[in-house]
Image (tube, coloured by chain):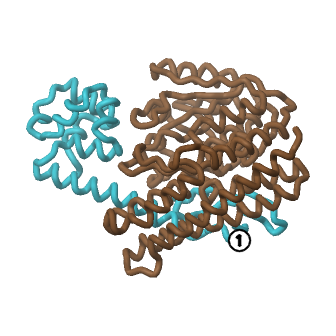
């Protein structure tokens, strides 16, 4: 934990968090005087999701996502907690940088979306060309900015002006185009119960009811079938690449472990205290158990990749683990839906 | 995952730590920092090694005179021709044309300059690859 003083003399406390967007959102709300934890933001913003997108490629391989669309967690959470937000992209990099400077001079902290490759404080092996990392800009320094990156570091760091401009305005897939956002005003006593109910129902809908077989629980089943066929269809090396790609989305992108399943379990636990509901606590335990299976899926995948084929671990086993997750998650979200509908805001 | 099960395998994040959510002894979720996980090392290592291998192959091709140094610097920035074209403000087909060494050698200084800016290297560096 580090404390920094902002341009208007207000203190800012840096806290480590598991995921960039939820960590940033939680910090923005805390700065406005509403103390709300990271899992709570994740749950209220309906962050949990699964999707396999064969038509969207990242480093040449299809994207599998364990969370909802970037940016939606912040906007949904802000809406449900009754906050007015400023959210803007820029065509002209100069204007984008000027606006950022103008706002942080007033002492308002600003979240920006950046491309990881251009952030030189990142560990070298995590600097991939990926535009979707969120961080908070605190104030200006002599040759750049002081930034707080809750998802990666335990302390605040300096970022040069050059890095910041390149990172914010990097071109390519999912361009951030200098996206910056912060809450203009926050309801000091938000109705957290109501927000939780909306968030949980929305999560159930996202996981169960999207009528396209690539999303939610159906997406997991679809991907399972593909995983099992990969070694025959693509050959061993290519199949390993694809499998590694899924595990990277599950673990590497700052997910708090098991592709956000543990954060969601933490949210359910917090919600169970809020609603004094033992059922939610049971669901939280179930989510933890599912998370453990996801971790096992990662371990099995890593073993497959490491031993290069002389196998007791097979693609069928990895696919099977994912299928178990799909079945149990389907049951969990059905139960959650039933439990939540009984609550009164 | 329990607190004592949070992987502390290796200092893989170059000394940094990452946060994980895990259950403490009372069954409550807390944030625990992890120094790295061997399973993650395998998948990340695969991707990093692949990029490095491609880059090395390109470097050799450039030295043999099959590709222009532009390809090497583009791959080092993990760009594709489309991304480089957008960053440098040029048409993609033009960028692809400049991948041919004989055409790259005749480029005007202004064109080289926009590539150098896009790839964050100097013009001198852009014309060569490391030995």
Report which colour depicts chain B.
Answer: cyan
Chain with colour brown in the figure: A
Residue that numbered label 1 is attached to: B4
Q: Is residue A243 left or right of residue A258?
A: left
In percent of width and height, residue B21 lies at 70, 58
Q: Quadrant of the C terminus of chain A?
A: top right
In percent of width and height, residue A237 lies at 33, 66
Asked whether the viewer can see residue B10, the reply is: no
Q: Quick one: which residue is furthest to the right in this view?
A: A276
In percent of width and height, residue B73 lies at 27, 43
Q: Is residue A87 left or right of residue B86?
A: right
Q: Residue at x 52, y 40 (%)?
A: A132
Chain under callout 1: B
In this view, the residue in front, A69 or A90, is A69
Q: Residue at x 44, y 63 (%)?
A: A227
Q: Residue at x 22, y 52 (%)?
A: B58
**Which structural element holds mark 1?**
helix
Q: Quick one: which residue is furthest to the front in this view?
A: A211
A339 w.r.t. A282: above or below: above
Q: Residue at x 42, y 33 (%)?
A: A170
In percent of width and height, residue B39 lies at 52, 68
A152 w.r.t. A177: above or below: below
Q: Is residue B122 left or right of residue A178?
A: left
B38 w.r.t. B65: above or below: below
Mark 1 closeness class: few <14, some 14–19, many ≥20 residues within 10 Å = few
């Amino acid at each position: 934990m580090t404390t920094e003083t902002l341009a208007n003399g207000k203190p800012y406390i840096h806290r480590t968090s598991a995921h960039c967007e939820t960590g940033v959102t939680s910090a923005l709300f805390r700065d406005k005087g509403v103390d709300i934890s990271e899992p709570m933001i994740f749950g209220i913003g309906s962050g949990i999701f699964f999707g396999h997108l064969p038509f969207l490629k990242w480093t040449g391989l299809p994207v599998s996502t364990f969370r909802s669309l970037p940016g939606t967690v912040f906007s949904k959470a802000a809406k449900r907690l009754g906050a007015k937000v400023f959210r803007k992209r820029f065509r002209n990099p100069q204007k984008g940088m000027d606006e950022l400077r103008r706002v942080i001079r007033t002492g308002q902290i600003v979240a920006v979306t950046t491309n990881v490759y251009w952030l030189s404080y990142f560990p070298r092996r995590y600097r991939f060309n990926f535009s979707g990392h969120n961080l908070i800009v605190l104030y200006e320094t002599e040759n750049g900015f002081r930034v707080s990156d809750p998802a990666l570091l335990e302390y605040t760091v300096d970022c040069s002006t050059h890095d910041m401009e390149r990172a914010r305005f990097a071109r390519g897939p999912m361009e951030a185009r200098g996206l910056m956002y912060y809450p203009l005003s926050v309801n000091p006593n938000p109705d957290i119960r109501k927000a939780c109910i909306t968030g949980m129902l929305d999560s159930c809908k996202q996981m169960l009811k999207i009528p396209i077989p690539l999303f939610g629980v159906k997406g997991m089943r679809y991907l399972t079938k593909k995983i099992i066929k990969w070694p025959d269809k693509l050959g061993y090396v290519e199949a390993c690449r694809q499998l590694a790609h899924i595990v990277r989305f599950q673990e590497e992108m700052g997910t708090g472990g098991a592709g956000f399943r543990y954060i969601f379990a933490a949210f359910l636990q917090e919600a169970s205290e809020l609603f004094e509901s033992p059922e939610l606590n049971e669901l939280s335990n179930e989510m933890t158990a599912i998370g453990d299976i996801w971790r096992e899926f990662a371990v099995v995948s890593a073993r497959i990749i490491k031993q290069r084929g002389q196998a007791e671990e097979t693609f069928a086993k990895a696919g099977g683990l994912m299928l178990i997750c799909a079945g149990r998650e389907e049951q969990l979200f059905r139960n959650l839906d039933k439990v939540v509908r009984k609550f009164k805001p | 995952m329990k607190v004592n099960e949070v992987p502390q395998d290796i200092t893989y994040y170059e000394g940094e730590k990452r946060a994980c959510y895990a259950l403490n002894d009372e069954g409550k979720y807390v944030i625990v920092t992890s120094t790295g996980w061997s399973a993650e090392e395998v998948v990340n290592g695969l991707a990093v090694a692949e990029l490095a291998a491609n880059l090395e192959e390109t470097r050799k091709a450039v030295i043999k005179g099959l590709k222009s140094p532009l390809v090497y610097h583009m791959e080092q920035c993990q760009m594709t021709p489309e991304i480089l074209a957008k960053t440098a403000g040029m048409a993609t087909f033009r960028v692809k044309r400049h991948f041919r060494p004989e055409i790259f050698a005749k480029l005007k200084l202004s064109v080289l300059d926009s590539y150098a800016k896009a790839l964050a290297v100097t013009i001198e560096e852009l014309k060569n690859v490391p030995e």
